[in-house]
Amino acid sequence: MLTIRENFMETIKGGHPDRFVKQYEYQEWINDPLFPIYFGNIIPGGEWVNGWGVKNKFPAGVPGPFPCCEGEDKVCKDVAHWRDYVKAPNLVLPPEAWKDCIEQVSHIDRKEKFVTAKVFCGIFEKLHYLMGMEDAMINFYDEPEAMHELIDYLTDWEITLAEETIKYVHPDALFHHDDWGSQRSLFISKEMFDEFILPAYKKIYGYWKAHGVEVIIHHSDSYAADLVPEMIEMGIDVFQGAVGTNNIPELIRKYGGQITIMGGLDNGIYDRADWTREKVRAGLKELLEASGPRYIIPGLTMGGPETTYPGLYEAVSEIVGEFDKIYFPL
């Protein structure tokens, strides 16, 4: 029987996995000292200000926190003068700040799982966290030079984050958030994405991979099918959070072997108070009959190993296991 790590690698490389990957089982997230500095300490049911000065709220009963970007809460009030407003949090800490993280990593069996660095809020999300979605959309058109400058600043900051993390814990994988669309369409055109966002990620993900990180997992629980070629170009190995509107079977037919799709069970459909194992089973059956078992990690689309309603995440992993004997017979 393959280890969890070996089975994952066989899955994404088109080899011979002996079972489905059970959602996030292959990732062991590190508790690095940088995350609380730039993202803040997550307070379910409460609010906080992150290291960029952005107020976040996390109402009870919702999947995750969201930024407050309007009125006095808006950090970057004029992108033409972004340097007056945007101050990146410091990431260079003394070695003793990494002591607990290094201790955690020392107990992870790298033959079984990937030591995984996590980065929440990528380049696009940082932009609309800082200035609000409406201003971000307008500024791509009205202030392209300033937006390019700000994106370069954010990119350099992310590379520093990568440098510091790699220096102390040498992660095997990166799990990176950045939502690029709604459920039905992209937030910006493919052409605009190629101009503003793609070059940044080629630098960021290129740095991680050039320094020993083997696997890049990118979370975007949105429509992003049009950007899969860009995902491949920037070095993404797993498109996590893929909702059904992406036409997952078609993506696998077109790009299988270049990228693996993780998701297929939209949290908006399944992560509900009335969830049932029967509904999950039916959804997995439909997904796998259409997509087949190759280059797919079937599961929920949440950006982490959790659900809003208790018990669902574990149930999905168990039910995925029921399909092993169908698609991976001994």
Image (tube, rainbow, N blue to C red):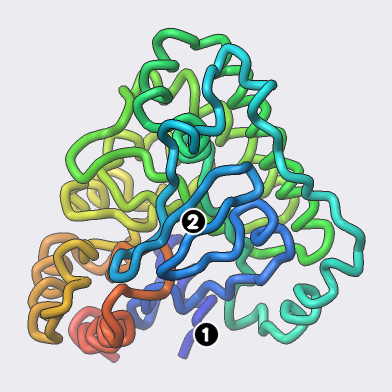
Q: Position of residue 301 (x, y in %)?
A: 30, 62
Rendered image quadrant of residue 299: bottom left
Rendered image quadrant of residue 323: bottom left
Instruction: Indicate which disc, 1 or 2, sits on the residue closer to the N terminus.
Output: 1
> Horizontally, is 131 left or right of 265 in the view?
right
The amino acid sitting under disc 1 is Thr
Q: Position of residue 179 (x, y in %)?
A: 38, 44
Q: Position of residue 136 (x, y in %)?
A: 42, 25
Q: Nearer the viewer, residue 110 or 200?
A: 200
For the residues bearing labels 1 and 2, Cβ distance under 8 angstroms:
no
Element class at badge 1: loop
The amino acid sitting under disc 2 is Ile
Q: Nearer the viewer, residue 89 or 179?
A: 89
- Whether residue 265 appears in this view of the structure is yes
Q: Position of residue 1 (x, y in %)?
A: 46, 91
Image quadrant occupied by the C terminus: bottom left
User: In this picture, is 23 found above or below 246?
Assistant: below
- For the residues labelled 1 and 2, the Cα–Cα distance comes to 19 Å
User: In this picture, is 234 found above or below 172?
Assistant: above
- The numbered mark at residue 50 is none
Q: Nearer the viewer, residue 259 or 201?
A: 201
* Disc 1: which residue: 3
Q: At 27% across and 79% down in the image, what residue appears?
A: 309
Rendered image quadrant of residue 293: bottom left
User: In this picture, is 87 found above or below 326?
Assistant: above
> Horizontally, is 12 left or right of 315 in the view?
right
Q: At 55% across and 27% down in the image, what residue appears?
A: 76
Q: At 14% across and 86% down in the image, what residue appears?
A: 277
Query: Alpha-carbon neighbours of circle 2 within 10 Å: few (<14), some, or many (≥20)?
Result: many
* Disc 2: which residue: 217
Q: At 82% across and 68% down in the image, what residue appears?
A: 98
